[in-house]
Amino acid sequence: MPFTLATWNINSIRLREPLVKRLLTEEAPDILCLQECKSPVEKMPLETFRALGYGHVVARGQKGYNGVAILSKLPLEDAGELDFAGLGHARHVAARLENGTTIHNFYVPAGGDVPDRAVNEKFGQKLDYLTDMRDWFRDSRPERAILVGDLNIAPREDDVWSHKQLLKVVSHTPIEVDHLADAQQAGHWVDVTRADIPQGQLYSWWSYRARDWDAADKGRRLDHVWASSDIAAAAHSSRILRAVRGWDQPSDHAPVFASFDL
């Protein structure tokens, strides 16, 4: 069963409903995973998306913060959620397709501004979240699974605009990169995007702070698509829709796409 999947931190599904509608209309992925929806499920504009053919939805919401949703043209069933680090946040939801493939949609904590858990509780929460991910993947090794989402870490040197300047900036510090690598290794996950695009600078996020984000191009690859090792070879056609970052009232993230032949 071939399908195309996209992941996008939308930074408010209600505020950016027109952008989601535009992406679904112009690009028409079979499945769209959204993070940072910032809305209870009952207030998400799901009827708008159902009218476009995305009649299958699995979501977890939270007023004003977090929130994850999976919109699909293909039938799927709710496969639950996990509360890593015991935060009580809507940061994970899973859905299972009819062919048995499970899709995990994650929104890993950003971690605040100071990369020191002794003075920044949020950074400690981020590391604990990643540790719990690692332990779960180790104890319940993923099979026929796809993991997507805003993992809030740019792991490779060419996943950021300046490796040297960002080594002490949250999202690219060595301790975060190591924690993410441990989680990836524990689940035998394959980074689909980098398997398809192995070389060169690659970003999915650009700060709102830049006067001209496109010209400055100080990006980071925070958004990821992974596949369990048993199905990784079925993935192809990865791309990041950079132009979406320039749409009217955009999210600071761009959608990341991948296709699968399963």
Image: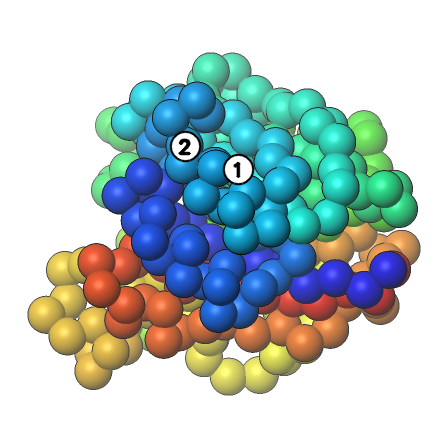
Whichever of callouts 2 and 1 sits on the residue coming sooner in the sequence is 2
Q: Marks 2/1: CA distance?
A: 9 Å
- Quadrant in which the C terminus appears: bottom right
Task: Say which residue appears at 51% left-offset and 15% top-offset.
Answer: 86
Image location (x, y in percent) of residue 115:
32, 42
Residue 247 visible in the current orientation: yes
Image location (x, y in percent) of residue 197:
62, 79
**Looking at the image, is 49 positioned above or below residue 38?**
below
Residue type highlighted by circle 2: Met
Residues at discs 2 and 1 in contact (Cβ within 8 Å): yes
**Is 247 or 120 nearer to us in this picture?**
247
Looking at the image, what colour scheme do you see? rainbow
Q: Is residue 123 left or right of residue 195?
A: left
Task: Say which residue appears at 70% left-offset and 28% top-offset.
Answer: 78
Residue designated by label 1: 69
**Looking at the image, is 57 positioned above or below residue 193?**
above
**Is 70 or 18 nearer to us in this picture?**
18
